[in-house]
Image (spheres, grey):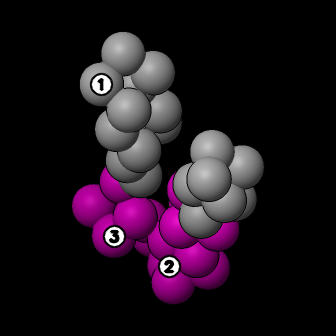
Amino acid sequence: MFDEENNVLSTPAYMLANSISDAASGIEKLVTKLVALA
């Protein structure tokens, strides 16, 4: 999730993940977005 108004990136990671691979997927998407914004 990216809040453009406040420049906040977030991912539920372990809160909603059923496995480590689910968490990794969300974290990778967050990092990709962060790098794109840099």
Q: What secondary structure is found at the residue carrying circle 2?
A: loop
Which residue does the numbered mark 2 point to in the structure image?
19
Residue 10 falls left or right of residue 34: left
What mark, if any, has residue 14 been given in the picture? 3
Report the front residue among 9 and 18.
Answer: 9
Which mark is nearer the camera, 3 or 2?
A: 3
Looking at the image, residue 2 lies above or below residue 29: above
Which mark is nearer the camera, 1 or 2?
A: 1
Estimate the x, y position of residue 27 in percent, counting from the top left.
Answer: 54, 67
- Identity of the residue furthest to the top in this view: 5
What mark, if any, has residue 21 been given in the picture? none
| Residue 27 visible in image | yes
* Dot 3 alpha-carbon crowd within 10 angstroms: few under 14, some 14 to 19, many 20 or more: some
What mark, if any, has residue 6 been given in the picture? 1
Residue 8 falls left or right of residue 26: left
Q: Residue at x 59, y 64 (%)?
A: 31
Estimate the x, y position of residue 2 in percent, counting from the top left.
Answer: 47, 33
Mark 2 belongs to which amino acid? Ser
Q: Residue at x 41, y 44 (%)?
A: 9
Q: What secondary structure is found at the residue carrying circle 1?
A: loop
**What residue span does the magenta drawing correspond to?**
12-30
Estimate the x, y position of residue 32 in percent, counting from the top left.
Answer: 69, 59
How far apart marks 1 and 2 lie (CA) works out to 30 Å
Q: Earlier in the sequence, mark 3 or mark 2?
A: 3
* Dot 2 alpha-carbon crowd within 10 angstroms: few under 14, some 14 to 19, many 20 or more: few
How far apart marks 1 and 3 lie (CA) works out to 23 Å
